[in-house]
Amino acid sequence: MAFSLEAALVVPLVISTWIGCLNIAEPVYSKVWQTARVEVLAAGFRIENQHLYQTADFQYGSARTTAVQTSPQMVLEICSLFRDDFHLVSRNYLKANDQCAGNGADNQ
């Protein structure tokens, strides 16, 4: 047999690495599974159209997370409302200033 010093060092190292990985595989698997389950619960969470945003706590086993969801339609409606109000107010303000400036010029 052609066992060398290199093989005598590498084989036990590889075997101990595999055993170490097998020892931590089950806890890692269970944590990943719990995290995936919580994400599935969070994905199924639907926001009601009455609110701009909504939070919910999800818990599965020892894993826990807080989800914040917004309503894109509500955000667009609010932005549109502010834009329309700004244009309405600025247009009326400019009209009022033009009328005041025109009346002042006619009186002089």
Image (tube, grey):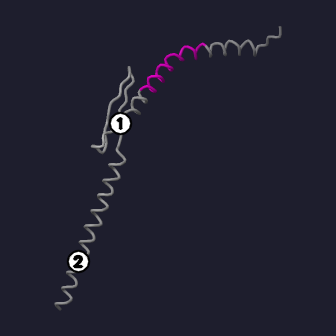
Badge 2 marks a residue whose secondary structure is helix
Residue 76: say if magenta: no
The residue positioned farthest toward the left in the image shown: 107
Image quarter of the C terminus: bottom left
Which numbered tag is attached to residue 46? 1
The residue nearer to you, when weighing 1 against 89, is 89
Q: Residues within 10 Å of mark 1 (few under 14, many from 20)?
A: few
Q: Is residue 1 left or right of residue 53?
A: right
Which residues fall within the magenta stretch?
19-37
Residue in the image at 33% along x and 30% along y = 57
Amino acid type at image mark 1: Arg
Sequence-wise, the earlier of marks 2 and 1 is 1
Q: Is residue 9 left or right of residue 68?
A: right
Image quarter of the N terminus: top right
Which residue is label 2 attached to? 97
Residue 65, image quadrant: top left
Q: Are marks 2 and 1 in contact (CB under 8 Å)?
A: no
**Residue 34 drawn at (x, y percent):** 44, 23
Residue in the image at 36% along x and 40% along y = 69
